[in-house]
Amino acid sequence: MRILITNDDGINAPGLRVLHSVATELAGRDGEVWTVAPAFEQSGVGHCISYTHPMMVSQMDDRRFAAEGSPADCVLAGLHDVMKDTPPDLVLSGVNRGNNAAENALYSGTIGGALEAALQGLPAIALSQYYGPANVDSENPFEAAAVHGAEVVRRILAITPEETADYRLFYNVNFPPVPAAGVKGFRIAPQGFRRNTRFGVEPHLSPSGRRFLWIKGGNQQEPTAAGSDAAVNLDGYVSVTPMRADLTAHDVLDAHRSIERA
């Protein structure tokens, strides 16, 4: 198997090293793992692409490239430049430092990379490591992802149907905020919503007196509805959320037919 990996934490992020190990195990002895990742951290950029300016791509090592762009840019660079003559069979994005469950999924560059791969017609999985009191200060906070990553990807690939839809499936995986031994299992879970927390801003003054705003996340230990992604993560399970890029609210299409006119 030939696998392309990327992330949004940057080419030197520890989570990318974890993902490379996972991908190497999945690829097997005769497989290949290629890395095209952002030269600098790109957290929170979502599915942004560098449409109005070019990006530089630099080769760091054998099959390892850094791009001055977003994770979606990196996937485009990987598919249409770096690996154009030997396209990958699978794209993996992560392992993100922190969860991309619930509303975080809408901001995530990690998911943006997987989404772009799906739009390009490839199987794609985003992987993120939840942080919490049980693992944030541990020697290896990515242990759950490192130990269970290859198995969950294999399980996903084994059940993924043959795709004919225009907007093909991709997957959002979040590893719980516990050591590897504390992982209880895997759960298919819908995207949840943290009702009592939001992104916001926090103002600060610079030494020169200028006012700046820092974007600030909410409480990540706030559970979502029972059975949804963050809830099962906080209960010790790996969540697997099937996703598509189609943003249409299909549940209300018929209810809105009254506004139509000939």
Image (cartoon, helix red, strand yellow):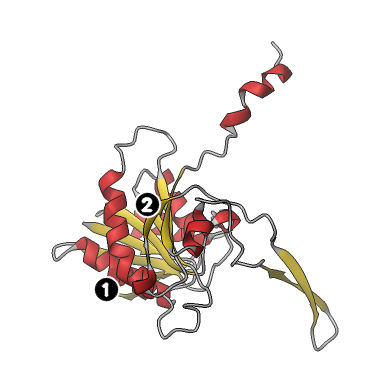
Q: Residue furthest top?
A: 262
Q: Residue furthest right?
A: 209
| Amino acid, disc 1 | Asp
Q: Please state if 206 lies on the left or on the right of 138 as rendered.
A: right
Residue behind mark 2: 124
Q: Nearer the viewer, residue 27 or 88?
A: 27
Image quadrant where residue 186 sits: bottom left
Q: Is residue 79 visible?
A: yes
Q: What residue appears at the point 48 percent right and 63 percent down from the top-left corner?
A: 235
Q: Nearer the viewer, residue 50 or 214?
A: 214
Give the mark nearer the N terminus: 1 vs 2: 1
**Front label number (1 vs 2):** 2
Residue behind mark 1: 62
x and y percentages locating residue 194 in the rendered image: 63, 56
Q: Please state if 142 lies on the left or on the right of 228 as rendered.
A: left
| Amino acid, disc 2 | Ala
x and y percentages locating residue 48 in the rendered image: 56, 55
Q: Give me the C-alpha separation between circle 1 and circle 2.
A: 23 Å
* Residues packed near mark 2 inside 10 Å, few (<14), some (14 to 19) or many (20 plus): many
Q: Residue furthest bottom?
A: 207
Quadrant holding the C terminus: top right
Residue at disc 2, secondary structure: strand
Image quadrant where residue 147 sits: bottom left
Residue at disc 1, secondary structure: loop
